[in-house]
Image (spheres, grey):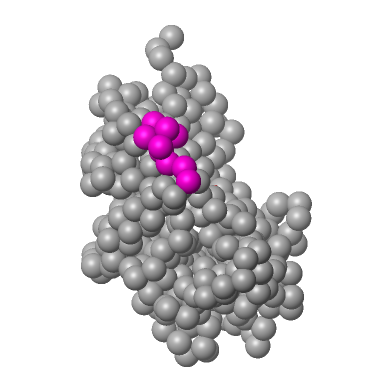
Amino acid sequence: MSERIYYTKPSITDLEVGYATDAARNGWGDKCYEYITRFENAFKEHLGVKYAIATSSCTGALHIGMAALGIGPGDEVIMADTNWIASAAPIVHLGATPVFVDIRPDTWCIDPERVEAAITPRTKAILAVHLYGNLCELDKLLEIGETHGIPVIEDAAEAIGSVYFGKRAGSVGAFGAFSFHGTKTVTTGEGGMWVTNDPALYETALTLSNHGRDPKQVRQFWPDLLGFKYKMSNIQAAIGCAQIERIDELIAGKRRVFEAYKQGCEGLEGVTLNPEPRGIRNGYWMPTAVFDRSIGITREALQAAFRVDGIDARVFFHPLSSLPMFTPCAGNTLAWDISARAINLPSYHDLSSEDTQRVIGVIRRLHDEAING
Ligand SMILES: *Cc1c(COP(=O)(O)O)cnc(C)c1O
C-alpha cells in the first residue's frame, strides 16, 4: 500500500519557527503588538489596500465587517448556495437572512443574473465568495450593487493569489475577508484578516473589533458600543509575517500542483478543472475535478475510489440550503446537482509529482470505468 496523500498541509520553514519563537520569548509588554502591526502592514502591501485588521478567523472578520455595514435583523444578504457555512453563519448571528442563489456552470461561483433577480427592499449586501480560488464576476456584481445602492462584500478566504484584471481578490469590494486556517494557502494556525479602502468603514470596524472602544476614546475601560473580540495573537502574527515573506513561493506551489493536474487530465472528455478565464489569475487554493452529468459518476464512487488508494480527497460543498438549519432551495439546480459529481483534490505546496501522478491515475481510471461501463 502506498503512502497516504493528505488533503492539505501547511508549508512551515525555519523562518516561521524563528519568528514564532521570538514572539513567544520576547513579544510581550510594549512589544505585544509588534508582529501584529507588521503582519497587517505586509498584508496591506501584498494586497494593495489601505487598511487591514488581523483577526482570529475569517468568520470573525466577516462578522465584524457585516456589523460595520449595519447588517441586522430583517436584512437580507444574497450569496451563492454552494458555499461553506462560515460565510453564512455571521449573517444569521446578526439576525439577518442569507438568501441563497444558484451558481454559474463555469466559475462555480455566484450567478450575477440570479443576484439581480433576488434583490428586494431588504437586501443589505451581496456576498461574493471566491470558490476554490475561482473568481466571481466582480464587475457585474459591482454594477448591480451600484444600481441598487448595495455593497459587495468579498469573502476571499480561498482566493489568496487570485487576481481579477490586475486587482488582487479581496481588494475590490466594500471590504474583503481572509482566512489563515491551517488548510489555507497562507496559514497562522487559525487566523484571518479584514481589509478595506474605505476610511469610515475601517474606523467603525476597528472600534467594533476592539470591544467597541473608539480609538479616540481617552477613558480607560470605556467601550462606546457593544463590539466583538476576534483578535489575532502576536505569536500567530509572527508566523503570518514569515508566510507573507514567502507568499510568492506559496502561491507558486499551489499553481504548480494545479498545472500538474491539468496536464494529467488533458484529453479527458467531460472532466473540468478550475477555470482561469482571460484577465484572471487563479490562486488555485483547491484543485477540483467536476465530472459531466453524462458520465454518470456519484459522490460515493468518487470518495470510494480515492479512499482505496490512500488519497485524502474531499467532497464538493453541499448546497447550504440543503443543511438542516436552512430552508431547501431546490430551484438552485446547479448548486444541488454539481456537488454529487465533483471532488476536491489534494494540494499542498510541496506535493510531489509522483503523488500528483497517483491522483491523476485515479481520475483517469474513474473516467475510463464510467465511460466503458
Ligand atoms: C475557510 C473559509 C472560511 C472560514 O475561515 P475561518 O478562518 O476558519 O473562520 C470562510 N469562508 C471561506 C470561503 C472559507 O474557505
Q: Is residue 284 above or below residue 135?
A: above
Magenta run includes residue 327: no
- Where does the image place residue 175, in percent across and percent down from the top left? 46, 70
Side of 324 where 259 appears, left or right: left
Residue ID at (53%, 60%)? 61
Comparing 225 with 113, the one in front is 225
Query: Which one is in front, 199 or 337?
Result: 199
Q: Which residues are magenta?
A: 21-29
Q: Please tell me whether residue 6 is drawn above or below residue 85 in the rendered image.
A: above
Q: Quick check: is 22 in the magenta stretch?
A: yes
In-image side of 372 versus 13 (left or right): right
Q: Residue at x 71, y 52 (%)?
A: 323
Residue 219 rendering spot, x and y as whole percentages: 62, 71
In the displayed structure image, the side of residue 343 where residue 40 appears, left or right: left
In this picture, residue 361 sits left or right of residue 209: left
Majority secondary structure of the magenta segment?
helix
Q: Is residue 211 visible?
A: yes
Residue at image point 54% right, 53% down: 231
Task: Tell me residue 214's x, y (percent).
Answer: 57, 73
Residue 240 against residue 156 in the figure, above or below: above
Position in image of residue 191 (x %, y %): 49, 47
Q: Residue at x 33, y 59 (%)?
A: 41
Quadrant in the rendering for residue 278: bottom left
Asked if residue 100 shows in the view, the reply is no
